[in-house]
Image: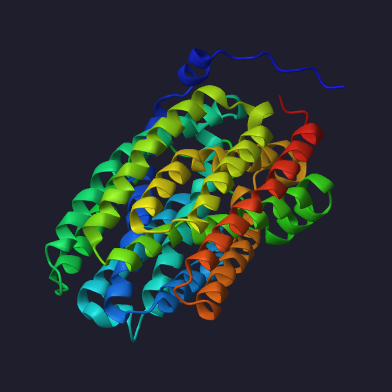
């Protein structure tokens, strides 16, 4: 039997995070803001230009579904060049995304909407392969949940302001693409800032061998599938994707469809971020490795309970109330899964030093889940267009899938001897 690790106080967990982590946090916050704003306003952009909810759903399905393909390319870039070079290629793809939309205008949301989907996917794919090495380098299992609480709090504060300002700004340009052109220009500037911050990161020293130029995708596959812990992680990731893909944007789409006003979407995001800040603060204090499964189960059950009320009332005001509740509890569902995933990479000998490859394999299962979740939502939209009960049922089913994650988290935690 493994001895339990000495427990750290809340103060000790936060104090153990050092300067390398906070340098990384600056850069990552820029990308979090970019991806968050895209998840909201690229959808309102598509809905306004095309008038089609299905187009927005297909955009997201292609974007999430193609990301693992770009991550395979990112793995080669990490090994043949360096993690830093691979990440900066991701910044280039994000820059190309915003330049394309600025140049193509509304046709980027109608005739060529798959191009932004693929460029977003490429940017995220190349960024997050290197991210998977960085989060392991700059944190430990003992302080990783605390780090998640800090990053969630800071990102939420930024996201509290930007969506509201963006929504009000875009609403002032009703009927004109000029507002969106300026908006995507702003995101281009954020990408440049993230690139500058990346220049000041502490080099990776322990998680990757700079002399190892060989890709390890085959080794990662064998390492994950050879044991029950690795297989459980992949199944957990699939079920995580079922909810995370569609719920990242679906409620905002429902609100925009109900009122057709970016300002209201921005207000909704601001309210949601207030709830998310409170949630992130509580998460960093309350959740420890041994509480991760309970965190997911309790938060999922609570969201389902509130979502059920949408069967009786589904106007935009009540959707905003539900969105805030969902935002506040979201971190209690997503982060236990993510933190345990990184812990498993460290605990399985066959996976050590192969974080990028493991993350790529894991991303395939995440994308399969995301495509399944968005596909379910798309089917509900096609067969029951404008039906609020169908949309509510989809939300409940997507969130209910997280009980499988809670079961798997409990199983994996017992298996690796986590506290």
Render colour scheme: rainbow
- The quarter holding residue 253 reads bottom left
Residue pushed farthest front? 312
Q: Is residue 148 above or below residue 187?
A: above
- Estimate the x, y position of residue 313 in percent, counting from the top left: 44, 56
Q: Quadrant of the C terminus?
A: top right
Q: Is residue 210 visible?
A: no
- Estimate the x, y position of residue 178 in percent, counting from the top left: 13, 70
- The quarter holding residue 401 reads bottom right
Please tell me which residue is depicted at 21% across the width and 77% down the height of the picture: 103
- Estimate the x, y position of residue 285 in percent, counting from the top left: 51, 22
372 left or right of 418 in image? left
- The quarter holding residue 140 reads top right
Please tell me which residue is depicted at 23% across the width and 49% down the height of the picture: 164
Q: Nearer the viewer, residue 107 or 215?
A: 107
- Estimate the x, y position of residue 354 in percent, counting from the top left: 65, 49
Residue pushed farthest right? 1
9 left or right of 194 in image? right
Q: Is residue 24 above or below residue 176?
A: above
Q: Is residue 31 visible?
A: yes
Count of numbered circles on the image: 0
157 left or right of 234 in image? left
Q: Quadrant of the N terminus?
A: top right
């Amino acid at each position: 039997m493994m001895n339990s690790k000495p427990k750290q106080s809340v103060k000790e967990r936060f104090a153990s995070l050092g300067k390398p982590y906070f340098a990384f946090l600056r850069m990552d916050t820029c990308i979090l803001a970019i991806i968050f704003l895209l998840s909201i306003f690229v959808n309102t952009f598509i809905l306004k230009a095309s008038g089609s909810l299905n187009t927005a759903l297909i955009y997201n399905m292609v974007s999430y579904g193609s990301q693992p393909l770009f991550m395979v390319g990112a793995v080669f870039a990490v090994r043949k060049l360096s993690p830093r070079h691979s990440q900066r290629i991701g910044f280039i793809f994000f820059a190309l995304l915003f330049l394309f939309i600025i140049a193509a205008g509304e046709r980027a949301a109608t005739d060529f909407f798959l191009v932004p989907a693929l460029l977003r996917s490429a940017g995220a794919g190349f960024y997050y392969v290197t991210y998977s090495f960085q989060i392991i380098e700059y944190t430990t299992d003992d302080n990783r949940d605390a780090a998640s609480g800090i990053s969630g709090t800071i990102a939420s504060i930024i996201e509290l302001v930007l969506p509201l300002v963006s929504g009000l700004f875009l609403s002032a340009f009703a009927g004109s693409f000029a507002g969106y052109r300026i908006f995507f220009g702003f995101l281009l500037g954020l990408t440049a800032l993230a690139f500058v911050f990346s220049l000041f990161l502490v080099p990776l020293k322990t998680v990757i061998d700079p002399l190892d130029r060989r890709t390890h995708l085959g080794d990662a596959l064998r390492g994950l599938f050879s044991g029950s812990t690795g297989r459980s992680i992949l199944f957990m990731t699939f079920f995580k994707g079922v909810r995370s893909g569609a719920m990242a944007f679906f409620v905002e789409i429902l609100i925009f469809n109900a009122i057709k006003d970016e300002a209201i979407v921005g207000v909704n995001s601001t309210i949601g971020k207030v709830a998310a800040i409170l949630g992130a603060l509580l998460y960093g204090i309350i959740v420890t490795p041994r509480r991760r499964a309970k965190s997911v189960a309790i938060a999922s059950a609570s969201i389902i309970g509130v979502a059920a009320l949408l069967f009786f009332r589904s106007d935009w005001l009540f959707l905003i109330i539900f969105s805030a509740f969902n935002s506040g509890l979201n971190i209690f569902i997503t982060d236990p899964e993510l933190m345990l995933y990184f812990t498993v990479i460290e605990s399985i000998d066959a996976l050590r030093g192969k974080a990028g490859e493991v993350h790529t394999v894991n991303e395939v299962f995440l994308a399969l889940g995301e495509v399944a979740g968005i596909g379910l939502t798309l089917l509900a939209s096609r067969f029951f267009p404008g039906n609020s009960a169908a949309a509510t049922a989809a939300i409940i089913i997507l969130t209910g899938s997280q009980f499988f994650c809670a079961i798997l988290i409990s199983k994996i935690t017992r298996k690796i001897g986590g506290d």
